[in-house]
Amino acid sequence: MRAPCVPAHLDVMTQTLIRPTAPVEKPIPVPALEYRPALDGLRGIAVLAVIAYHLDVPGFRGGFLGVDLFFVLSGALITALLLLEHDAHGRIDVPRFWARRARRLVPAVLLLLAVVVPLARADIGIRGDALATLGYVANWRFAAQARSYFAEAAAMSPLNHMWSLAIEEQFYILWPVLMGMLAPARRRLVAVLVGLTALSAVCLAWLFATSNPSIAYYHTLARIHEVVIGALTAVAMLRTTPRMRRLRALATAWLVPAVVVIGAAITMMGEAAPVYYLGGSVVFSIVVGVVILGLEDERATRMRALLSWRPLVTVGTLSYGLYLWHWPFVVLFRRLELDGPALGVAVATMTAVAAVVSSRLVELPIRAGRLWRFELTTRRSLLSSLLVLALGAGAVIAATPAGLAPEWTQAVAGEPTVIVAAPAAHSTRDLRSDRAAIDRDARSATGAPGPADDRGPNPTRDPLVIGVVGDSAAASMLPGIAAAAERHGDEVVSVAARGCPMVPVWQLDETGHSLNYSQDCRRHVQTAFTELVERHDPDLVLWYSGRDTQTRFMVDGRMAAPGEVHHTAAVRSGFEQAVERLTAKGADLVIMRSLPRHGSEVTDCDRPPGPGVHWCDDVDRYIGPTGQNALYEELAQRNPEITLISQAGLVCGSGPVCDDAMTTFERWRSDLTHFGGRGALRIGEAIITDALAESGNY
């Protein structure tokens, strides 16, 4: 007996036209929309824009708007299908809708997690990210953590992009229920949709102005206006009233300018631009709605043909898989230090292969309504989806650690999280051999005392809790700091974070655009110092940072360059706030003066001022390492609990120019700023020795 004919229907995520090969349901068939290849082309533009943005391709500063484009498209197509179903049958079969969405979304996500979770580093909290992904609440997790969508890939979770799928799924759960209640009265439906749009736009602007741009970016209510504007577009697509016909004609007339606006926004809109949060997202979504509506007109032949270009349509049909897989590969290859064209080729190749394999072997068979010989009815689809999600959560819990790995390497990677550096992680034999080699090489190179001249543990004092704050230069010293703390029986807690100054400001590049990790750093400085003090109550805090006087900031709505009056004022004020937070429970604060760059002149500003030396009269006081040291000196004069130490003599030697060679073949610093190898071990131990002695904690 032949299976009943099931009409083609429109899938809104990737493969627009689906022709089942097996009976997916025996109830009344769902009405179909005519296939629109131009919308697949529009979807292809969206996913290509997002991928190009994540690869830092020039000309795609606003590529993140591809997600907004996806939201509007989903809102339009899903709402159109639901309204057609209601018009045809007088009701919406909500369970059946959920079952179709589950068959479409869940298998690919499970495959992604099965690959990503075992390969992810344990120190990025992959367990929580994976569980949030399975529960489709990833956007709430990232909002609660104030995790920036715009942060550098090497410092991010390979699942950070799943926030958008979470919002989509939340929409899919609630929307058919809402449509079932409002579809009978279209005017009331339009009024509710307009009200939701206004509420969402206000929420986005309010969250941006009062809390945190990351929270605004991830918040479901703050982003739902994009989906709702798509729903309003669907109403205009289907209604045949004179007013709606005039609206469609107007959209057709503005079709080309609207496409140009979308292209210009993807090219020029910066991720930190306030205009996006203060109405720009709404305007962009309306423009996308104009394009969708304009393409409905038969007269839009040229634009339809352009967007129906076969390669672009092919990308659009694979957009779901391409979106799922591209970001984990970006993160992976960034951590392998690929960049530029090599990164682009690697990500594009692996993403395309993964998306095609996922589509052909997993997504299409299940989406057709049959798994092997097992027919996936509505009830079976829903129950099996819940079961596999629960089993997936159990597998994630079993395969991942409960918390963050206690390694300082996370701070170097840029995750702004408190990390307890466990000295026991070092091999005693390796440390002993390293110290012996360092002593020999360092004495022959500089004549400076080595760690063997350290005074050793003091049996008369209790163990200390030592906090470490600063940027990645401070984090690079942690191996030596932990080794010294081990010998003294002390504990080290680090909140040093890659790329983060000690002041909570937006960091800008030379063109005035926000650096990718600016928001993460602002959040880190505002919370991590207090967390360090409240949770660990350190006896001593070590401070080493080199970015504060060398990075452009956004101050009071304008760009501030190093050395400018308002830049210096912002750094000075930020330093004072940091001191207040770090010493709130009486901790001693030891600040290590910034070191000269390799090959630069060593001035009086790099060393403690001697008798008769007036601090930094012969240099620009507030630019670069020497300028930062001048600010430290002023800070110490105003705050007696601060001790300043310098390791310039140890690292640079005694000459007028800083030559930080440890041996003929090895330098203290792995680059102009960070310490590595024996240099990292030895500078950390030297800092501990001086800090304990100068602060009276020996």
Image (cartoon, helix red, strand yellow):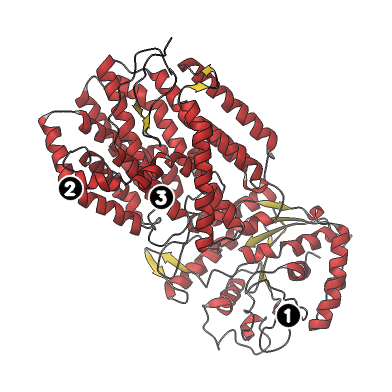
Few, some or many C-alpha atoms within 10 Å of disc 2 (few <14, some 14-19, many ≥20)? some
Q: CA distance from mark 1 to mark 3?
A: 47 Å
Mark 2 vs 3, N-terminal side? 3
Residue at the far left in the pictured view: 242
Asked if residue 212 shows in the view, the reply is no
Q: Is 286 located above or below residue 191 in the figure?
A: below
In three-dimensional space, the C-alpha distance between marks 2 and 3, rounded to whole angstroms, equals: 24 Å
Res 289 quadrant in image: top left
Q: Which residue is mark 3?
A: 48
Q: Position of residue 25 (x, y in %)?
A: 42, 16
Residue named by callout 1: 661
Foreground tag (1 vs 2):
2
Residue type at mark 1 is Ala
Query: Circle 2 is placed at which residue position?
Result: 254
Foreground tag (2 vs 3): 3
In the foreground, 315 or 402: 315
* Above or below for 659 versus 237: below
Residue 643 vertical placement versus 243 (above, below): below
**Nearest to N terminus: mark 1 or mark 3:** 3
Above-or-below relation of 204 to 594: above
